[in-house]
């Protein structure tokens, strides 16, 4: 079989091409139109037929160009790498220097972002307009691809200060899409939301599960992301996927009226812990929908475990969060101790996952790949770093992290990466970062500490903003005489958090509203 | 205090809570620039609800309407018949 991820879209274009595939603003794109644009993009990429396969960077967001760029890349036999045009120029340049893409696809926002250092780091082949594409070749088909060929690379925060690329093969998308189809039974009548940005791995499900089913994809405009109630109603969506904070925000805005979303049949919350209260409010607003909490990892192609909201709901004790459930079809889950030995149910340990959705590893980083993707008795596992426990019913509960990875407004951040930038700015290694404040298992921001006298908090924040995505810029910066250390000589983050707790004047609003992510 | 000054004082408090004491112009971007996040927007919504009796339920909500002091003032004017006269 052909594992090319553009193949299912192409099949629908052939069998029922007039059907709606994508709706961006006022622009409706049918399956046949999408296939024509993808084929032309692939032809542009493959002008030199002898070119080795590589990465195509997609510097575009929520536009027809972005999705055509993805599908055209796949059609041509390359792997795509999404880059958010809203990133600072230096960050875009750093990513392009790491990737060395064979080509770059832009939309209006991407063209604006391609300045200075980012422009210099761009490849020679840049697609700025569909007008520059060669004519359609109706004989052309998506290139024949193998299961292990790379499909895409998504960057996540890296603890050493350099973002790390997760390389995911085509078999992973195939397994994800097959599993989701098995669980939900989507059909051509379904209308999918697309709230996640392309650089968030949740978008893999949105796009490929949708086009596999012959359904239509509806990107949520950036200005409606916080409160998409009207969007869901107007677009008559049947499938909603987003971070849970969308439900939290809508509930607070009194927009989750009972029965508000009768068209919804399926809801997936993913990317952050799901507070029970928000899940129940959503269920009342969408009475015809199942409400699922899905836990996912970029290293396992977006979605890994599923818990369906039930009556009574399965809740993680003390945290008020919905459980993360059981592995999706195709996955094997285990709870590991420090030596990667499986623990019995009821004991806390690290969640490890095996199966066809597991990534190939980290780009150009065999060492880290070997640590996080150990092969045990011939089977490759991904060690998630998530601290979990299995209850009597076999459901998994997420209890936190075993390392220094944090989630801020839904974004995954390695504190080590923040500290590495801080150290460079402050000219000293005496720096520290913590996620603070933390509510409902999700942090609102980063607080930074340093020992460099003479640097103002604003100066440090301004310099950080030039280097990292804005959710990684510390909201608070404090100068200390020394950074507290534990007996083992590591940064005493608990002491720093206690210091912040003590200094805050009991901010009740944070207890009331967990954070809302704006991807 | 008039509406503009009250609103400005409220937003400056929100910014100061996050360590942001930069100047704040009427047209300066707050949401798209990342200076305010969604929790801050909720705070502004609560402020508008309690001071101007604006009810956001069942209304179209566009986060860009909150992007600057000028835009929030326009929002108040649009939704409150006698804008600028806060209720007790």
Image (tube, rainbow, N blue to C red):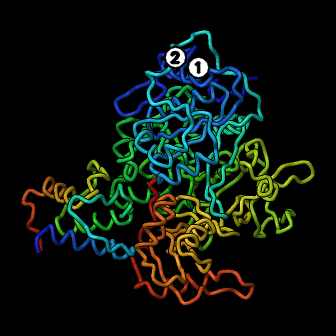
Nearer to us in this view, A445 or A296: A445
Q: How many marks do you count on the picture?
A: 2
What element does badge 1 sit on? helix
Are there few (<14), some (14-19), or many (20+) residues within 10 Å of tag 1?
A: many
Res B10 quadrant in image: bottom left
* Left or right placement of residue B52 versus residue A145 in this view: left
Please identify the residue farthest to the right as the structure is shown.
Answer: A377
Q: Which mark is residue A43?
A: 1
Residue A254 in percent (x, y) is at 33, 57
Quadrant of image for the N terminus of chain A: top right
Q: Establish if A421 lies above or below A135.
A: below
Nearer to us in this view, A507 or A317: A507
* Left or right placement of residue A130 versus residue A307 in this view: left
Q: Chain of mark 2?
A: A
Residue at image x 62%, y 34%? A102
* Left or right placement of residue A325 versus residue A70 in this view: right
Residue at image x 45%, y 31%? A128
Does label 2 or label 1 sit earlier along the sequence? 1
Residue at image x 32%, y 53%? B63
Circles 2 and 1 in contact, beta carbons < 8 Å: yes
Q: Which mark is residue A134?
A: 2
Residue A17 shows in this picture: yes
Are there few (<14), some (14-19), or many (20+) residues within 10 Å of tag 2?
A: some
Same chain, labels 2 and 1 = yes
Residue A181 in percent (x, y) is at 64, 34
What element does badge 2 sit on? loop
């Amino acid at each position: 079989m052909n594992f090319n991820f553009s193949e299912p879209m192409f099949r629908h274009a052939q069998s029922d091409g007039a059907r709606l595939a994508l709706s961006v603003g006022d622009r409706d794109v049918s399956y046949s139109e999408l296939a024509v644009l993808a084929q032309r993009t692939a032809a542009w990429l493959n002008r030199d037929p002898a070119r080795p396969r590589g990465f195509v960077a997609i510097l575009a967001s929520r536009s027809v160009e972005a999705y055509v760029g993805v599908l055209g890349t796949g059609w041509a036999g390359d792997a795509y790498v999404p880059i958010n045009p809203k990133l600072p120029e230096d960050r875009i340049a750093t990513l392009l220097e790491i990737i060395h893409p064979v080509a770059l696809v832009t939309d209006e926002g991407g063209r604006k972002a391609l300045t200075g250092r980012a422009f210099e780091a761009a490849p020679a082949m840049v697609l700025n307009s569909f007008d520059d594409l060669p004519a359609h070749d109706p004989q052309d088909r998506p290139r024949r691809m193998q299961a292990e060929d790379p499909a895409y690379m998504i960057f996540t925060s890296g603890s050493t200060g350099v973002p790390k690329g997760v390389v995911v093969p085509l078999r992973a998308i195939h397994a994800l899409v097959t599993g989701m189809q098995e669980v939900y039974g989507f059909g051509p009548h379904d209308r999918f939301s697309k709230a996640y940005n392309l650089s968030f791995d949740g978008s893999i499900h949105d796009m490929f599960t949708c086009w596999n089913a012959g359904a239509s994809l509806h990107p949520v405009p950036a200005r409606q992301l916080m409160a998409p109630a009207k969007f869901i109603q107007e677009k008559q969506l049947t499938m909603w996927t987003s971070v849970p904070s969308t439900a939290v925000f809508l509930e607070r805005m009194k927009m989750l009226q009972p029965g508000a979303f009768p068209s919804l049949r399926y809801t997936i919350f993913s990317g952050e812990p799901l507070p029970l209260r928000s899940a129940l409010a959503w269920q009342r607003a969408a009475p015809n929908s199942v409400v699922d909490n899905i836990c996912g990892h970029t290293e396992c192609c977006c979605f890994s475990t599923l818990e369906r909201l039930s009556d009574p709901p399965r809740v993680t004790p003390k945290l008020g969060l919905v459980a993360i459930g059981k592995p999706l079809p195709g996955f094997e889950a285990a709870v590991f101790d420090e030596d990667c030995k499986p623990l019995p149910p009821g004991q806390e340990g690290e969640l490890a996952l095996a199966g066809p959705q597991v990534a190939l590893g980290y780009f150009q980083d065999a060492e880290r790949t070997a640590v996080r993707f150990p092969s045990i008795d011939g089977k490759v596992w991904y060690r998630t770093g998530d601290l979990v426990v299995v209850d009597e019913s076999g459901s998994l509960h997420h209890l936190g992290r075993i390392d220094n990875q944090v989630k801020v407004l839904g974004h995954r951040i390695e504190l080590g990466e923040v500290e590495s930038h801080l150290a460079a700015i402050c000219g000293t290694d005496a720096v520290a970062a913590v996620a603070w404040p933390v509510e409902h298992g999700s942090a609102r921001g980063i607080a930074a500490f340093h020992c460099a006298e003479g640097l103002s908090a604003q100066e440090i924040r301004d310099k950080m903003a030039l280097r990292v995505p804005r959710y990684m810029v510390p909201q608070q910066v404090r100068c200390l005489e020394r950074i507290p250390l534990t007996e083992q000589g590591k940064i005493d983050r608990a002491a720093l958090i206690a210091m912040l707790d003590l200094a805050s004047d009991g901010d009740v609003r944070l207890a009331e509203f967990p954070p809302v992510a704006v991807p | 205090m008039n509406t503009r000054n009250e609103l400005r004082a409220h937003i400056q408090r929100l910014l100061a809570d996050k360590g942001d004491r930069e100047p704040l112009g009427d047209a300066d971007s707050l949401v798209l620039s990342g200076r305010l996040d969604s929790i801050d927007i909720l705070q502004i919504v609560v402020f508008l609800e309690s001071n101007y009796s604006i009810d956001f339920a069942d209304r179209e909500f566009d986060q860009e309407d909150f992007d600057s002091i000028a835009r929030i003032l326009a929002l108040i004017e649009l939704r409150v018949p006698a804008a600028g006269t806060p209720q007790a």
